[in-house]
Image (cartoon, rainbow, N blue to C red):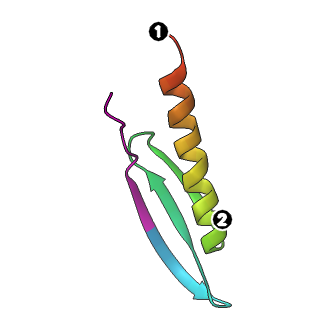
Amino acid sequence: MKEEKATFVINVLYRNASTWQGNLHWLEGDKESAFRSEIELLSLMDSVLDVKKEKEEEPD
């Protein structure tokens, strides 16, 4: 079974206090979220991958 990947567009709007702030757009899910740090950005991306994994595990 081929594992699908998620596609993101990351817009870094500001760099403040040695961290990024901006928007994360998930293309397949057509959802957008703001982030205030790199850690928050990675957390948002991880949560999207968890959602994708849960959907793949659901029986048809």
Which residue is rendered at x = 60% and y = 73% of the image?
38
Q: Farthest residue toward the left?
A: 2
Q: Tell me if residue 33 is in the magenta stretch.
A: no
Which residue is at the far front? 1
Q: Residues within 10 Å of mark 1 (few under 14, many from 20)?
A: few
Please identify the quarter of the rendering in which residue 41 is found.
bottom right
* Residue bearing mark 2: 40
Q: Which mark is residue 60?
A: 1
Pinpoint residue 36: horizontal percent, then vertical percent.
Answer: 66, 72
Tell me residue 40's x, y (percent): 66, 65
The region drawn magenta spans 1-10
Left or right of 39, for residue 57: left
Name the kind of residue labelled 2 in the image.
Answer: Glu
**Disc 1 versus disc 2: distance between alpha carbons?**
33 Å
Q: Observer-nearest residue: 31 or 18?
A: 18
Across and down, in percent, residue 58 comes to 54, 17
Magenta region includes residue 5: yes
SS class of the residue under badge 1?
A: loop
The crowd level at tag 2 (other Cα within 10 Å; few <14, some 14-19, many 20+) is: some
Q: Amino acid at mark 1?
A: Asp
Query: Which label lies toward us, 1 or 2?
Result: 1
**Prevailing SS of the magenta stretch:** loop
Residue at the image position 52 percent from the left and 33 percent from the top: 53
The residue depicted at 55 percent of the width and 45 percent of the height is 48
Judged from this view, the residue extending furthest toward the bottom is 17
Q: Is residue 9 above or below residue 22?
A: above
The first of marks 1 and 2 along the sequence is: 2
- Total count of labels: 2
